[in-house]
Every structure is written in structure tokens, then in C-alpha cells.
Image: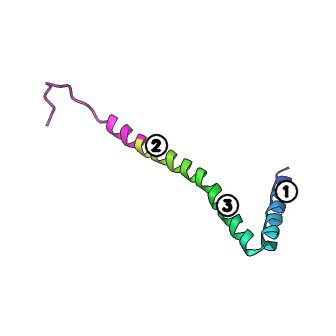
Amino acid sequence: MTLGWFSAHAAQCVMCYRTAAAQQAERSRVLNSGILILLIPPILMLAGILLLAFRRSGSVAKSSEPRSRPGSVSPI
């Protein structure tokens, strides 16, 4: 079953490659631009998730420090 899935996707890659190679230069440029435009949303989502994780990791580290109460004397 896995082999059938892989071969189906590999055939599509070859088919897309041959179609792109047979196109004129202008169409190839448009295809490349389209690919780059379609990459923008996933990259932005990944950057947002990483930023959120980075901010959360900093807040977790700060919240794990012991807090002293106002007016209490902290040990030296």
C-alpha cells in the first residue's frame, strides 16, 4: 500500500517536471512565481507558531522563578 502511494506521487512529480520543461520561458517564470506565492502562507504560519512557542517558553521560565510577597524579606 505504501509503495503504491509513493509511486503515484513520484509519477506526478515527473509529469509536472516534464510539463514545466516543455513550456516557454515566460510560462516557466509564471509557474515559478506561483510556487513562491503559494509558499508564503505556510512560511508565515510556521513563523507565527515558532514566535508563539518562543514567547511562551520565556514566560514559562519566568513563572518558574519563586516570587516573593510584597513586604517580605527575601533570603540573601
Residue 9: quadrant of the picture: bottom right
- Indicate which disc residue 52 carries: 2
- Residue 36 pos. (x, y %): 63, 61
- Residue 38 pos. (x, y %): 65, 55
Dot 1, how many residues are within 10 Å of its Cα: few (below 14), some (14-19), or many (20+)?
few
The answer to whether residue 64 shows anywhere in this view is no
Residues 22 and 49: in front is 22
**Distance between the alpha carbons at the discs numbered 2 and 3:** 27 Å
Instruction: Say which amino acid is labelled 3.
Output: Ile
The answer to whether residue 15 shows anywhere in this view is yes
Q: What residue range appears in magenta?
A: 56-76
**Distance between the alpha carbons at the discs numbered 3 and 1:** 21 Å
Mark found first going from the N terminus, 3 or 1 = 1
Was residue 73 drawn as part of the magenta stretch in this picture?
Answer: yes
- Indicate which disc residue 35 carries: 3
Say which residue label 1 marks: 8
Q: Secondary structure at mark 3?
A: helix
Residue 43's place in the image compared with 70, above or below, is: below
Residue at 45% across, 47% down: 51
Residue 8: quadrant of the picture: bottom right
Q: Is residue 27 left or right of residue 4?
A: left
Mark found first going from the N terminus, 2 or 1 = 1
Dot 3, how many residues are within 10 Å of its Cα: few (below 14), some (14-19), or many (20+)?
few
Residues 67 and 35: in front is 35
Instruction: Say which amino acid is labelled 1.
Output: Ala
Residue at 74% across, 69% down: 27
Residue 14's place in the image compared with 62, above or below, is: below
Instruction: Say which amino acid is labelled 2.
Output: Leu
Asked whether the beta carbons under mark 2 and mark 1 sit within 8 Å of each other, the answer is no
Asked whether the beta carbons under mark 2 and mark 3 sit within 8 Å of each other, the answer is no
Mark found first going from the N terminus, 2 or 3 = 3
Q: Is residue 69 left or right of residue 20?
A: left
